[in-house]
Image: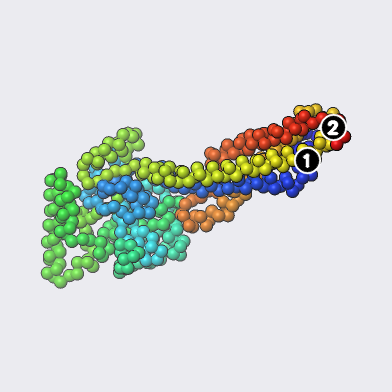
Amino acid sequence: MNLISIAWKSLKQRRLASCLTAFSIALGVMLMVLVLVIFGAVDSAFTQRSIAYDLIVGPKGSDLQLVLSAVYRMQPPIENLPYLYLEQLKKDRRVVSAVPLAFGDVTQEGSFPIIGTTPEYFENDYMPGRAFKIRGTRVNGLLDTIIGFEVARKNKWDIGSTFTIVHGGADSGHVHDEKFVVVAVLAPTGTANDRTVFLNLEGFYAIAGHSKPVVEYEQRLRDFYAADPERLATAMAQLEAQKKLEAEEAGAGHDHAHHHHATPDAMKEVTAILVRTRPDTPFDSLSLTSELQKGYQAMAVNPVRPIQKLVTGLLGNIQKALVALTAIIILVSGVGIFVSIYNSMSDRRREIGIMRALGARRMHVFGIVLSESTLLCVGGGLLGWLIGHGLAVIAAPWLIEQTGLLINPWAVNPWEATLFPVLVGLAALVGFLPAMTAYRTNVADALNS
């Protein structure tokens, strides 16, 4: 009979104490697994894996607010950029793709954000190596929309559903007259796209109330293109033509707000621009960022850096604190194993003496006690690992619904790879003293006890 079998029989003789000590280890490991699974999902969502663009271009302001607004839709936008700047950026040799985003409204049901964009948004990956999967048709009409998976699920919408939107946010109370139609539904992505409604960019501009007075556009363009007289002159010519058109419509008694004629580029604005630079020249994004810092009233932000600062500075410390707490729980459980085995030594002196008298060597006895502590630590750890991931499987649907994160409950965090070697080391540490006590047991005294 090998040492493990003897140790297992010895633990079975003390079922209650053995189960309680192993369960204390399992509890600590279970808590650590849950912490790692949840924070692993958060880390995946707020890192480079969450966006396939190199830069986000927007009005100058807070880089964190720009990223939280454009990528995660968790903050209001800073301001808008002229649409003419988007056209200018597309012509830059360093830019492979420049996708506009226009924010402003929310759905009347569920208050999901409305974003105007172009078909190119869905042609690009939403994460590196992950393409959109869309059920339905392309956006063709001005009022056609593509909705995210969570929007469809929570509002019970599908292809053909119609809805209205609220201007400026859920608190404004002004509902647009237009009825929008769902023509496609996105498959789950685990990103903010799941909680977003996408409109054709031209349809976004055509919504009543989205245009401002021409005078306001004039001032904004003069401020933005103060250092570029040529582009400013082009924009002013478009605005003058628009003034003339509005004057003619007013003279004919037309209501300009309900005429969906083409909006001049000079009167269009975008909230942010998602930019992909040439992959073979990594310095393109750096040079473009540097150029914008000292040029127009715009800035380019690497979407990863501000989020990494946020995650590292806030969530990272929380994760470390929780992991440290669970490590303390495991350590205390290890002390419980030590006390349990050590206290059992006095009751097992005669048993050890009989084993020695039957030919067992000191090292055999030493190994049996160490095997007991190893079985308790590793067995409890394995049980805790299974319970932790099992609870994650059960809780995953609820967490996905509450947070929108795609959680893989069986994803193994790199920290988990060190868990069982650490438990083996803990078993050796807490079992060493009881094992030495058994090792030094005098056979004659033990048999006479």
Residue 7 sits above or below residue 120 on the image: above
Q: Name which quarter of the figure residue 380 lies in.
A: top right
The residue positioned 29% from the left and 43% from the top of the image is: 300
Quadrant in which the C terminus appears: top right
Q: Amino acid at mark 1?
A: Ser
Mark 1 crowdedness (10 Å alpha carbons): few <14, some 14-19, many ≥20:
some
Q: Secondary structure at mark 1?
A: helix
Residue at image coords 35%, 67%: 164
**Residue drawn where x is 43% and y is 51% of the image:** 191
The mark that comes first in sequence, 1 or 2, is: 1
Graded by Cα atoms within 10 Å as few (under 14), some (14 to 19) or many (20 or more), the crowding at tag 2 reads few
**Residue 330 quadrant:** top right
Residue with the mark numbered 2: 445
Whether residue 102 appears in this view of the structure is: yes
Residue type at numbered disc 2: Asp
Question: Total number of numbered labels?
Answer: 2
Screen quadrant of the N terminus: top right
Depth check, front residue: 55 or 248: 55
What is the basis of the colouring in this image?
rainbow
Residue 442, x across and y down, in percent: 82, 30
In this image, 212 relative to 100: left or right? left
Outermost residue toward the bottom in this view: 253
Q: Which mark is residue 10?
A: 1
Looking at the picture, how far across and down is residue 211, in whole percent? 22, 61
